[in-house]
Image (spheres, rainbow, N blue to C red):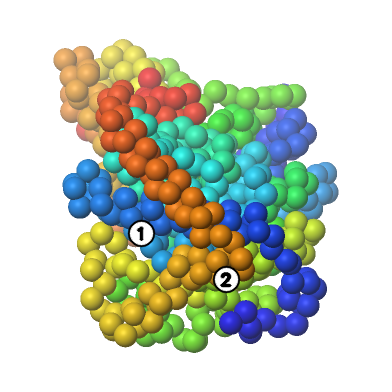
């Protein structure tokens, strides 16, 4: 078991899969010689050469189009989109083309591709480089959505995403790149669509994703130490496929559900989970479902303003206490 | 009008002579496209085809010329005006008509429709209905061919209107810097939808005049002369196949009808329409064949066989049952299903 940073776990997963399968290739802006603007692809050019690790122009439509065309003709490409906000300039390729082509062609076309991007806030990049856009993708049938919180999951889930025969959007939380965690040595693959219960408690179930997972864990510590409330914390890891069985099982045990989303309020994934739990587990609930989200406003750049906007441990504690007390 | 090419594209490639057998195939191919789309129009009028449809009546020479020149493992990418490009890759008339009619004999059993014809086993990699996307995707197939060392070429068709969207420019630059085996073919039918391309474009020739911006030779051809299209295609394919990178070809042509089913095309001056009808690629080529000494009887035999083929295809397609309902929820994912939760 090695201690790796989140960003090194990205490179480790890429290297693991590129060694295993010669059809795995990487393309994107500054991914080769520069090792990625977030340094998540360092060393790949040296090991795999310029034929498999390719720098591109600032042409996101061309990048994702090439990714799709390569995937439909035998390669297993991984595209690096740098910031997930850039999905807005190439959304046609994602929403209209990649997501729908297998369906429209009656299953003729298979698209084993991954689009990696740095997602989310907390790094003071302002409103156009800090968004959590996973909900954009969740609204479109045909896309798998992964958003890990820990380096070990980064490696295992990225490996699984690359091996998947379906298109996967892999969201790396940019404020987590420097965090460290245990990553298993040797081949490491985690099945997509399996949530992880990262803390077990008896009073309330907190469901979180990516950067909100460590914040939920911190909140759970405060709740236990200062308020005697014992929380279960679920790290969803994937939004599609969504592990509703784990959510329903854990909420049934505690009778209370709090979702913690980094994305802006309206139509966030927490609303879908709240809807599922309300429909399927209503009579097991001991209170209303609470959603904690970023308010429905763009993210600001200044330290104190962005901190005010993103859910943090204190807000999660307050949300849980409103439900449990 | 095989003019306007800079030195090199033409000079490097001597004029290919076309034998009689190939000419007859080119004629048959164009005629098959024509009867297919005329039949599609008739079936619309009978309300047997719903939705929309974008016919390429009058533009058959580009599809036939390239279809003849391509290797069977080369890739086709085209637009929603793609019935002809699908047919010339060897897909049956029945499968195309049935897809337009939305029934179980259709190429995609009704899940795609007119604008999305795709047949992977024919290397017909799709008809793309959002302007510009297919250029970027064709690059990916070309990259894959280059990576795998197969000497396959991706041929990507698009209309004049596409030259004003960002993806066109991104894709051209990308193809050139990666030296991809891809041939971009602009079928310039002079109108984007209802508006003349000249009214909305900074240059006279929407594709050819942009070529130099990407270090490519401008190639402007008569897209209604199937011999010229065929020869141009052979050169561009050969260039791509031997590692010479992409080409951008502008083929001037004209659609006989409107943009889509809903459009009678009244915005076009009568004299312009008449002038282009006189340049219809099919009667023009038929006359050339006769002039070259091919007998009327031989050409007439192709006419008759093609007519019989479309009648047979129509009958088969019309009588196919609707698609089974269960396929509505199949093939979102590679496992064949559509589950998003457990």
The tag earlier along the polypeptide, 1 or 2, is: 1
Instruction: State if disc 2 and disc 1 touch (CB < 8 Å).
Output: no
- Left/right placement of residue A265 relative to residue B8 reads left
A312 over A233 or under it: above or below = below
Q: Residue at x 38, y 53 (%)?
A: B35
B207 over A37 or under it: above or below = below
- Left/right placement of residue A324 relative to residue A140 reads left
Camera-side residue: A32 or B93? Answer: B93
The image shows residue A32 at horizontal and vertical percentages of 73, 55
- Left/right placement of residue A42 relative to residue A287 reads right
Chain on which label 2 sits = B
What label sits on residue A18 in the rendered view?
A: none
Mark 1: few/some/many CA within 10 Å (<14, 14-19, 20+): many
State the residue position of label 1: B55
Mark 2: few/some/many CA within 10 Å (<14, 14-19, 20+): few
Q: Residue at x 65, y 68 (%)?
A: B232
The image shows residue B211 at horizontal and vertical percentages of 62, 77
Camera-side residue: B134 or A260? Answer: B134
The image shows residue B181 at horizontal and vertical percentages of 70, 58
The quadrant the C terminus of chain A occupies is: top left
Tell me if I can see residue A240 in this picture. no
State the residue position of label 2: B291
Q: Which type of secondary structure does the marked residue at label 2 adopt?
A: helix
Specify the quadrant of the image occupied by residue A57: bottom right
Camera-side residue: A232 or A23? Answer: A23
Of the residues tagged 1 and 2, which is closer to the observer? 2
Tell me if I can see residue B300 in this picture. yes
């Amino acid at each position: 078991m090695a201690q790796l940073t989140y960003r090194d776990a990205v490179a480790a997963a890429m290297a693991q899969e590129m060694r295993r399968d010669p059809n795995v290739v990487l393309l994107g802006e500054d991914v080769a010689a520069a090792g990625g603007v977030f340094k998540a692809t360092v060393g790949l050019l040296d090991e795999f050469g310029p034929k498999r690790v390719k720098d591109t122009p600032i042409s996101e439509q061309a990048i994702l189009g090439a990714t799709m065309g390569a995937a439909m003709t035998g390669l297993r490409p991984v595209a690096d989109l740098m910031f997930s906000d850039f999905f807005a300039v190439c959304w046609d390729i994602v929403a209209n083309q990649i997501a729908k082509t297998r369906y429209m062609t009656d299953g003729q076309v298979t698209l084993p591709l991954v689009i990696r991007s740095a997602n989310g806030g907390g790094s003071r990049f302002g409103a156009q480089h800090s968004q959590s856009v996973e909900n954009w993708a969740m609204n479109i049938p045909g896309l798998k959505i992964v958003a890990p919180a820990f380096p070990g999951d980064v490696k295992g889930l990225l490996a699984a995403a690359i091996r998947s025969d379906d298109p996967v959007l892999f969201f790396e939380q940019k404020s987590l790149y420097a965090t460290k965690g245990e990553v298993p040595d040797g081949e490491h693959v985690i099945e997509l669509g399996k949530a992880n219960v990262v803390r077990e408690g008896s009073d309330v179930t907190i469901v979180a994703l990516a950067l909100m997972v460590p914040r939920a864990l911190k909140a759970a510590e405060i709740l236990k130490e200062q308020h005697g409330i014992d929380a279960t914390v679920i790290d969803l890891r994937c939004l599609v496929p969504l592990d509703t069985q784990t959510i329903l099982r854990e909420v049934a045990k505690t009778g209370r559900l709090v979702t913690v989303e980094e994305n802006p309020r309206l139509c966030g994934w927490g609303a879908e989970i709240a809807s599922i739990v309300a429909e399927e587990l209503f009579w097991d609930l001991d209170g209303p479902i609470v959603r904690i989200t970023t308010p429905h406003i763009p993210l600001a750049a200044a330290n104190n303003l962005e901190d005010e906007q993103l859910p943090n441990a204190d807000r999660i504690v307050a949300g849980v206490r409103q439900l449990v007390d | 009008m095989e003019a306007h090419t800079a030195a090199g594209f033409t000079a490097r490639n001597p004029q290919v002579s076309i034998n009689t057998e190939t000419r007859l195939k080119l004629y048959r191919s164009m005629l098959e496209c024509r009867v297919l789309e005329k039949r599609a129009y008739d079936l619309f009028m009978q309300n047997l085809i719903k939705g929309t449809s974008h016919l390429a009546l009058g533009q058959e020479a580009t599809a036939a010329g390239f279809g003849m020149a391509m290797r069977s493992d080369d890739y086709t990418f085209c637009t929603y005006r793609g019935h002809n490009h699908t047919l010339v890759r060897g897909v049956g008339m029945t499968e195309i008509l049935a897809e337009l009619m939305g029934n179980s004999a259709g190429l995609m059993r009704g899940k795609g429709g007119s604008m999305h014809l795709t047949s992977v086993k024919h290397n017909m990699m799709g008809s793309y209905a959002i302007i510009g996307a297919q250029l970027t995707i064709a690059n990916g197939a070309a990259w894959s061919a280059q990576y795998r060392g197969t000497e396959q070429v991706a041929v990507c068709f698009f209309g004049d209107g596409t030259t004003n969207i960002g993806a066109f420019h991104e894709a051209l630059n990308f193809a050139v810097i990666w030296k991809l085996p891809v041939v971009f073919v602009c079928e310039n039918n002079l109108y984007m939808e209802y508006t003349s391309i000249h009214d909305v474009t900074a240059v006279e020739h929407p594709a050819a005049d942009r070529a130099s911006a990407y270090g490519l030779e401008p190639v402007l051809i008569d897209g209604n002369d199937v011999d010229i299209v065929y020869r141009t295609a052979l050169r561009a394919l050969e260039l791509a196949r031997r590692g010479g990178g992409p080409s951008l070809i502008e083929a001037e042509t004209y659609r006989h009808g409107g943009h889509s089913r809903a459009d009678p095309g009244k915005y076009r001056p009568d004299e312009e329409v008449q002038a282009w009808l006189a340049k219809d690629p099919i009667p023009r080529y038929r006359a050339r064949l006769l002039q070259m000494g091919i007998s009327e009887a031989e050409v007439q035999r192709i006419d008759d066989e093609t007519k019989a083929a479309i009648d047979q295809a129509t009958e088969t397609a019309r009588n196919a049952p609707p698609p089974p309902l269960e396929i509505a929820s199949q093939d979102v994912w590679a496992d064949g299903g559509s589950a998003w939760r457990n």
